[in-house]
Amino acid sequence: MSKRRPDKRKPRKRVFVAFPSKVLRDGEGPVDEYRQFVHQLREIGCDVTCPLEDVNWSDRKPNRPQLTMKDRLKSIETTDHLVALPVVAGQCSPGVMGYTFYAAAKGIPTSVYLRGSNDLDVPWQLVGLRHNKSEFSIHFYQSNLLSGFADLAGSIVDCSVEEPNVPDYGQDDAACPFGDEYLDYWRHRRQLFSRWDEGIQYDDIGLSCIKPESIAAEIAGQLGGECVLDAFTGLGGNAIAFALQKKKVIAFDTCKPRLKMARHNAGLYGVADQIQFVHGDVFEGWKKVRDQVHAVYLDPSWGGPLYSSRRTFRFQDFETEGKGDVRIFLANAYKDKKNICISLPKNFDTRELTDLHGGLVAIDHSNDRDESGIRLSWHTRGTKVLFMTAFF
């Protein structure tokens, strides 16, 4: 996906990011989430210093960099902006709070990033700074670090990363056939299918569920295995991406008309023969295909465009027909030693992934599993987070 490159004529913002060193120990979120947060700051044109980047997170007891507080304070003195995340599991980190007050004393612009949405969530130690320091601001995120990133980015740089240019599709394409609720999906439809104008078939629900073609290709490249189960295929975007990478695909969907659309769309890409389309409930059909597949991809319905209005999205909020439970399905695939990935809304509470992974490791007593955690991949357009994918 195209991104606007930082303007080389403007000096790059130097940003110091202060994370609590106990982020892993207290289970605030997967480490990939913190790494992606730093990566996103660099994507908008910042030179980022983050002491925790030097930590070896693969160890059960991470080795921390041998830097003194004095060394870090010197780094803060030369920075243009401090981004501090001082609260973990409801408790303030003394170290990060120290950085925050030091920057305030030096007059360095500071953004504190907190989970929550109102004054009650602001630690009392920060209240005075917020009211008396013009260069001090507080930003909130909801369910994961990137859910409020665009707002934070706007306070650090003069202008955030622009949306990729959307081509002028002509007057005949001006109106979305499904109303304004689906307008954003409609505007980016040619990013969903590069062969849209060749006769792609779609409906409103399928349009809101499909993933951009380039991102589907990234997911397909990261999920290993010669045969992939696409558990909720929709319009077939991800199934097509897997097939284009020479994988065999078994694609399930409970909606017969939409499954027919997916077959038609796969034909436009010349891969329909590589995909077995199955009309039915994947929760019931799993036992019949489990021995054939090496990997499983899940993208259960998020409930249409209104999913983003939820403050926090959880596993229980997925809309699946019948009595299927996504967590149980994941556990069964995990026990069968399949490669697994699941696409999740941008407001998904990543603490549920941490809890889920702990349960999966507990039921699997083999020694060949990677117990270091779940790998998260965020998919973005500029500073806007579209969704994330978790790989097990």
Image (tube, helix red, strand yellow):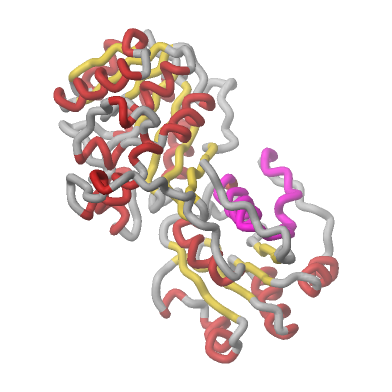
User: Residue shown at 56%/48% (left/top)?
Assistant: 3
User: Residue shown at 46%/51% (left/top)?
Assistant: 385
User: Residue shown at 54%/68% (left/top)?
Assistant: 154
Q: Is residue 357 left or right of residue 47?
A: left
Residue 246 percent coordinates (x, y): 47, 12
Magenta segment: does it hold 47? yes
Question: Relative to residue 130, is residue 117 depicted above or below?
Answer: above
Question: Relative to residue 160, is residue 213 depicted above or below?
Answer: above
**Quadrant assignment, res 197:** top left
Question: Can residue 87 be seen here?
Answer: no
Can you name the residue that lies furthest to the front here? Answer: 171
Q: Is residue 273 left or right of residue 338?
A: left
Depth order, front residue of 252/165: 165
Question: Can residue 19 be seen here?
Answer: yes
Magenta segment: does it hold 341? no
Question: Relative to residue 147, is residue 33 depicted above or below?
Answer: above
Question: Relative to residue 73, is residue 244 depicted above or below?
Answer: above
The magenta stretch is 32-59
Residue 137 percent coordinates (x, y): 55, 78
Residue 171 percent coordinates (x, y): 26, 48
User: Residue shown at 48%/38% (left/top)?
Assistant: 358
Depth order, front residue of 263/63: 263
Can you name the residue that lies furthest to the bottom here? Answer: 132
Depth order, front residue of 234/171: 171
Q: Is residue 161 left or right of residue 81?
A: left
Residue 92 percent coordinates (x, y): 58, 70
Depth order, front residue of 369/107: 107
Q: Is residue 103 left or right of residue 232?
A: right
Count up the numbered dots.
Answer: 0
